[in-house]
Image (spheres, grey):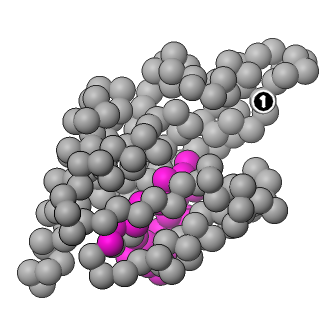
Amino acid sequence: MIIQFTGLSGAGKSSLAQQLRQIAQPGHEIVIVDGDAYRQTLCRDLGFSKEDRMENIRRLGAEAARLDAAGKIIIIAAINPFDSVRKELEEKYNALTVWIRCDIPTLVERDTKGLYRRALLPEDHPDKLHNLTGINDPYESPESAHLVLDTHLQSLEESAQALYQFLLDKRQASSAS
């Protein structure tokens, strides 16, 4: 089973994937394909243009498919900003889309990497970040996510429990058919 997360920086994608791994019962192995980690290896030649961002997700999807094996749950934890490439992964790998949604005020408040502070600087500031997804670079909200988790309204634990139940339900439904 391949799950592709989508959500803005700081929404909790990596934290949620790690929390899911901690609560998963024996026999439910969770493998995380973390976009930040793979930017340093598999995708280090890519920049942040739309084309490069889409290629990044395609590569992460191919890596997830390579890792996929019976009984494993593969989580692609990446911003994944474009609906067309999310649909590609759904069609090619039967990837389910989970939108890790968080409102901008909460993201600005969290700002774990200092990205929002830099993106909101004046245009002429030398430290201005010009390509933060959802602020000054596009983010396409999913047209048809299989699950939406509002991390500004739920705790990490609540979101992880809701995601885990969703995965168990999907697994049960696929084994029944």
The amino acid pointed to by label 1 is Leu
In front of the other: 21 or 132? 21
- Left or right: residue 122 compared with residue 37: right
Which residue occupies 51% across, 80% down?
Answer: 66
Q: Which residues are magenta?
A: 72-96
Q: Residue furthest left?
A: 176
Which residue occupies 18% across, 78% down?
Answer: 174
Q: Is residue 89 above or below residue 130?
A: below
Residue 136: x and y, percent?
Answer: 70, 33
**89 inside magenta stretch:** yes
Q: Is residue 80 above or below residue 115?
A: below
**94 inside magenta stretch:** yes
| Residue corresponding to mark 1 | 129
Q: Is residue 151 above or below residue 31?
A: above
State the count of labels: 1
Residue 119: x and y, percent?
Answer: 72, 25
Q: Secondary structure at mark 1?
A: loop
Q: Is residue 32 above or below residue 81?
A: below
Around disc 1, counting alpha carbons within 10 Å, would you say few (fewer than 14), some (14 to 19), or many (20 or more)? some
Residue 49: x and y, percent?
Answer: 77, 53
- Specify the quadrant of the image occupied by residue 143: bottom left
Residue 96 in view of the camera: no
